[in-house]
Structures are given as structure tokens and as C-alpha cells.
Image: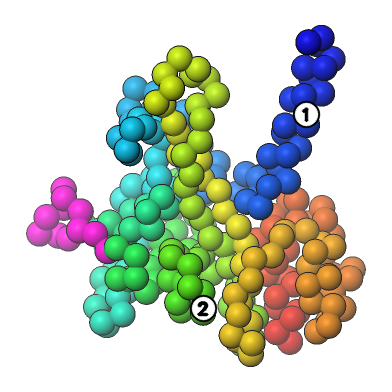
Amino acid sequence: MTAILRSLFFLSATFIFLSGSAQAPGTDLALNHNRLLREKTGDGVYKQIGNFKVVGTPYLFGEKNKGNLFSPDGTKAYNIFLSYNTYNQDIEFYSSSNPDKPLVKEPGEADSFFIQPNIEIGILSPLKFVYGTAIGSSEKGFYQEVFAGKRFGIYKKYKSELGYVSTNYIQSELRQFDLVFDYYYSDAEKKTVKKIKANNSNVIKEFKSIKDLSGLVSNDAFSASPDEAFKKIFENLNN
């Protein structure tokens, strides 16, 4: 294969990856932070999952983030350290009586949690996550609230997948945690939750029967910060 053909193959593979259902990293703070954590730890530290040795971390923003945790039975915990496992959707948290061994809330046992601001890693305002049932979703897991309006809300759902380690072709059992996310919007009137792509044409088409959103946000705005672009759109939709 010539050098030109190899280059074309690489560009085609890259395009296919970026066109998938999950969003590319772009400027997403969590994806960039988790990638840095994986690069920092290297291949020598891993978790055993089935037959695979998995490097990196499944925890959003790493482990032990300061936050608040709320359960369906009314139990509340403020200013605790918690870890959000995006691979199995568990929430691990630490009590003052046993700060070294985490307690675990399995999917459905917590209805929401907050990660508090942490300037050191770039979290400038609290991040709110709600369990799927709170917005009418039947999917297991938590959704980050980007904007919640009276009728329409926009959310971001993170998950970790087991991907191949591109720098290691020798150890066939080696994998890495690849953090990805998709956007979903809720419609309280129709009681639905639907995936939506972060681009201008798709958003205009999705809501054309409700409101003309053309000219409100550009594709450049989505590329620079999809969260902010979606906030502007959903503020407008709820007016």
C-alpha cells in the first residue's frame, strides 16, 4: 500500500469514527480529563473486567469528587466524596466513619447527584446528574442536566466502552476505557426522551413543527461548545 493510500485509509477511518452516534471529544471537559488520566497512569495500571485488562478509568473526572447525593427514599448526603462509574453506572461514595472503603449505589438506587465546582480540573459550576426515570427514560444510567425547561430539557449521557489500545498490539487482552457521550432531549408534554445530534441542521429539522430555529445557532457554535449551543436553543424553545 502506498503512502498516499495509507493516508486516505486513515482519513476515512477517522471520518467514520467522528460520524458515529457518540460525540467526538471536541472541547468536552470530561473526555479530555479522562484521557489525560489514562495517559498519566499508562498501561501498567489496569482493572480486570472478564478476560480483559483495562487501562484508564471508568470514573467521570476520576475518583473522589466532592458532591451531593440523593436517594429515592429521601436520604440525602451533602459535601461527600463520590465517584461516578460510567461503565456500570454505579455511584461510589465515602462516609466519614469509613473514608477509605466506598459504599455503592447501584443503578436505580440513587435518583440524582451533584459534582461540586473544582477549579483545578476546570469544573466552574455544579454539574447535576439525574437518573433516567426522572426524565422518562427507560435506559439504565444517569443524564447530566445541560438545561431543563418547563417543557423541553437537554441532557448529556456518558458511558465508558472497552476500546482497543492503539499503542499496544502485543497484548491481545489489553483494552482501555473509552469515554463517550450522546445528547438527549426530553419533552414533558409528550413524555418522551429522544437522542439528538449536536448540529444545526438536525436541530432545525427536529423542531421545525414547533418553532423555526434557523439562524439561532451556527454549526461553528456547536463545534466550539455544544453545551452552550444547546442551552441557547432550549431556552428559546421553552419561551
- 10 Å crowding of disc 1: few (<14), some (14-19), many (20+): few
At label 1, which amino acid type do we have? Leu
Q: Residue 236's image quarter? A: bottom right
Q: In this rendering, does residue 47 appear at all?
A: no
- Numbered circle sitting on residue 135: 2
Q: In this rendering, is residue 55 above or below 146?
A: above
The residue closer to the viewer here, 106 or 111, is 106
What residue range appears in magenta? 95-105
Residue that badge 1 annotates: 11
Q: In this rendering, is residue 63 above or below 10?
A: below
Instruction: Give the secondary structure at mark 1.
Output: helix
Report the side of 198 relative to 121 (left or right).
right
Residue furthest right in the image: 215
Q: In this rendering, does residue 152 appear at all?
A: yes
Residue 104 is covered by the magenta coloring: yes
Instruction: Give the secondary structure at mark 2.
Output: helix
Q: Residue 53's image quarter? A: top left
Q: Residue at x 50, y 40 (%)?
A: 178
The image quadrant where one finds the N terminus is top right
